[in-house]
Amino acid sequence: MKFQRHNLILKLIEEEPIETQKELSDRLRAAGFRVTQATVSRDIKELRLIKALASDGSYRYATAEKGENGLNERLI
């Protein structure tokens, strides 16, 4: 279950500008995962996601490598 959830998180942040844990939690729940804020927080830490500055000035979750290759990396 965790493996599938992690894969979906990576897919979601690649395809959508996810800015908050709540947005990520909502997307996961819509996909049928039963998650809490604590679970999403742990997933973010385990996947080593960062908050990166997008070209439009908003911050969104990204992988560390994506932050280096297109978004301005910025930890929040």
Image (tube, rainbow, N blue to C red):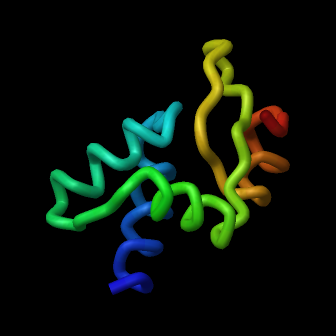
- What is the residue that sits farthest to the top in this orientation? 57
Residue 31 to residue 22: above or below:
below
Residue at 32 percent across and 86 percent down: it is 1
Residue in front for this viewpoint, 66 or 42: 42
- Judging depth in this view, the residue of 15 and 40 nearest the camera is 40
Percent across and percent down for residue 68 are 84, 49
Compared with 71, 12 (above or below) is below
Residue that appears at 47% across and 37% down: 18
Residue at position x 28%, y 48% in the image: 27
Which quadrant does the C terminus fall into?
top right
Q: Quadrant of residue 16?
A: top left
Q: Is residue 1 above or below residue 11?
A: below
User: Does 10 sit left or right of 12 as displayed?
Assistant: right
Quarter where residue 52 is shown: top right
75 left or right, relative to 57 = right
Where residue 55 sits: x, y (%)?
67, 20
| Residue 63 position in % (x across, y down) | 68, 57
Q: How many marks?
A: 0
At a point 21% along the width and 55% down the height, the residue shown is 29
Please tell me whether residue 27 is drawn above or below residue 4 in the rendered image: above
Q: Position of residue 7 (x, y in %)?
A: 43, 74
